[in-house]
Image (cartoon, rainbow, N blue to C red):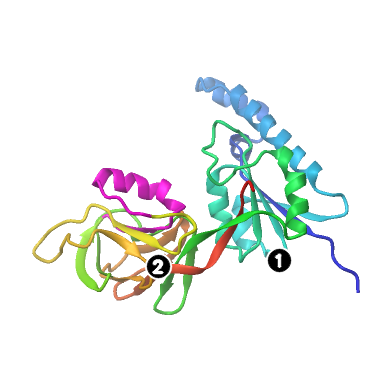
Amino acid sequence: MAILAPRVIVVRRETEMDRVRAVHSTVASARFVLARKRIPLGAVETAHADFFEVLREVHAAIPGEWRQATIFRSDVERFVFGPDDIIVAVGQDGLVANVAKYLDGQPVIGVDPAPGVNSGALVRFRAGDVGRLLKLAASRELHVEHRTMAEARLDDGVTLTALNEIFVGHRSHQSARYTLVAGGRGERQSSSGLIVATGTGATGWARSIMQASHIALDLKPTEPRLGYLVREAWPSPATGTEIVAGLVETEPVVVTSEMDDGGTIFADGIESDHLLFGWGRRVSIGVSSRRLSLATPA
């Protein structure tokens, strides 16, 4: 029986020029319209050309006999990843988070197309590294770190997974009402919602909340623990502010909605990929059994 060649899935972000072309029929018309608004297109065109040079180098590094496919970030939720696929994410750190929840152990090689512009926490490699890394991945010798992910599970069994954080609140970000149970304690709350973050997410949204509230949670990307943070809890005769932060380890955080309409749960900042969270619905958020296998320097 023939053995299939390895398959590489290149996931790329949309450039600003891609978005310009989606709005205007031609680059010339876009240049004309933007010039009237005194918005230069030159820098956008240069960044686009630089990105495609990186993308060209990535594709050139894939052995000719290997199978490959290229998809946009917007295609990820509809794409069927194979169990032996090797993922190459070319873009910002957020692109890795976007693809992570649709994987189940496949290795991810993050390529930074603009070193010095992106933070590079998850996209740690350059295009010139890809050829070597692909060979290591195919021989199961790629050095990876297994990053903890979070999972939200509704009372009907529907789940949502996140690499950075899960948000629970109102879709308009107005006051959300719910009951929170964490660490054996429960409290009715009215707040701007809450997030449950991983160690990876602790450097993003969670970090800004911790800085604003002067709260520190010990979260590391590879340790099986999460942290919850309540945003702007409001004290009233019916709602409290005692349970606003803590660690999630063996027992999940449980939230019961008291929102008639607009309750939502979303992951990694993608509000379009959400779960409805109307009155009486209950969600448990804990450490996921799935982890991101992220390629790292040996």
As drawn, the residue found furthest toward the right would be 1
Instruction: Please tell me whether mark 1 sits on a helix, a strand or a loop.
Output: loop
Using the image, determine if residue 63 lies above or below residue 253. Answer: above
As drawn, the residue found furthest toward the front would be 298
Residue 91 sits in which quadrant?
top right
As drawn, the residue found furthest toward the bottom would be 156
Image coords of residue 56 (percent x, y)? 76, 38
Residue 255 sits in which quadrant?
bottom left
Residue 183 vs residue 273, the one in the foreground: 183
Image position of 21 (left or right of 287): right
Q: Does the rendering let one see residue 253?
A: yes
Please state which of the two labelled residues, at mark 1 or mark 2, is closer to the viewer: 1
Mark 2 is on which residue type? Leu
Q: Does the rendering let one see residue 26?
A: no
Which residue is painted at 59% across and 33% down in the image? 115
Using the image, determine if residue 94 lies above or below residue 83. Answer: above
Using the image, determine if residue 285 lies above or below residue 294. Answer: below
Q: Which residues are magenta?
A: 192-218
Which residue is painted at 73% across and 38% down in the image? 128
Image position of 12 (left or right of 199): right
Mark 1 is on which residue type? Gly
Q: Is residue 285 magenta?
A: no
Quadrant holding the N terminus: bottom right
The residue tagged 2 is: 276
Image coords of residue 179 (percent x, y)? 24, 70
Image coords of residue 24 (percent x, y)? 61, 35
Residue 55 vs residue 229, the one in the foreground: 229
Instruction: Please tell me whether mark 2 sits on a helix, a strand or a loop.
Output: strand
The residue tagged 1 is: 82
